[in-house]
Amino acid sequence: MILFSILWIPALYLFVEALQQPRDPEKKGMVLAVIGGSCFAVLYFFIPQFVPEGAFGFLRFLYGFFDVVALPVLLPLIFRYLLQIRYGHQKYIEIHQFVLMWLIPVALVKGIQWNINKDPILLVLVPLLWGALSIGLPWLINKAEEEIGFLSFLSYAGTVLLSLIATAAYWAWFSKLYIAAIPLAIVSMFPSLWYLIKKYIEVTKS
């Protein structure tokens, strides 16, 4: 019931907004993002985890990738690109905006779950990593599409590497390997910071 009370009004608001301008693909994109994120959040709440939460070592890394850090960001990213393939003629909201909108209900639900244990890794570090991946991964993918040849390959490889680095930051922090966790977290946030600073400079100049 708590999930319904948290997610119903935002989803209903966006649905009504989409009806007001039914031909606006950006509004449709917002609705799809929030509804998709809400469905995923509910499923995430009830479906068992891919890897046991009490795992250690490499299994803990897999737990971080699938259940905590990377997969919650990769799913809306994949869904958004499937929309682009299926409805290529329509201009939906920007990819990073779509991913961030999707993550709003997911973050609400996971925040309630994680708040039970008051774990700062889950309550502070993971949202930072989600934000870094939500902006950094689409930026790298766009770079890969703009470039050709080896540079394009490097950008695509960077998307995979960035997901692994962010997961490694979570794993290292959990394992109390702070000497590795802090640099890994900074590296995982670098592409998103670069994008945001560049965008900010462009906006202030215009």
Image (cartoon, grey):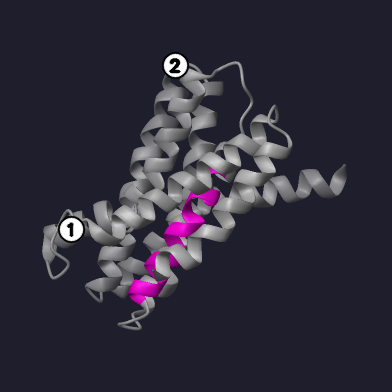
Q: Using a 10 Å C-alpha cutoff, classify the residue at mark 1 as few (fewer than 14 neighbours), some (14 to 19) or many (20 or more).
A: few
Rendered image: mark on residue 182? none
Name which residue lies at 31% across and 64% down: 170
CA distance for labels 2 and 1: 41 Å
Element class at badge 1:
loop
Given residues 180 and 65, the one toward you in this image is 65
The residue identified by callout 2 is 149
- Give yes or no for contact between labels 2 and 1 (Cβ–Cβ under 8 Å): no
The image quarter in which residue 55 lies: bottom left
Q: Is residue 20 left or right of residue 88?
A: right
Q: Is residue 174 left or right of residue 201?
A: left
Residue 205 is situated, as x and y percent measured from the top left of the image, at 86, 45
The magenta segment: 98-114
Tell me which amino acid carries mark 2: Gly
Is 102 part of what is drawn in magenta? Answer: yes
The residue identified by callout 1 is 48
Quadrant the N terminus occupies: bottom left
* Nearest to N terminus: mark 2 or mark 1: 1
Name which residue lies at 51% across and 53% down: 190
Is 199 part of what is drawn in magenta? Answer: no
Residue 36 is situated, as x and y percent measured from the top left of the image, at 44, 44
The image quarter in which residue 15 lies: top right
Name which residue lies at 25% across and 76% down: 176
Q: Quick check: 135 above or below 23?
A: below
The image quarter in which residue 95 lies: top right
Given residues 31 and 125, the one toward you in this image is 31
Residue 83 is situated, as x and y percent measured from the top left of the image, at 48, 26
The reply to whether residue 37 is in sight is yes
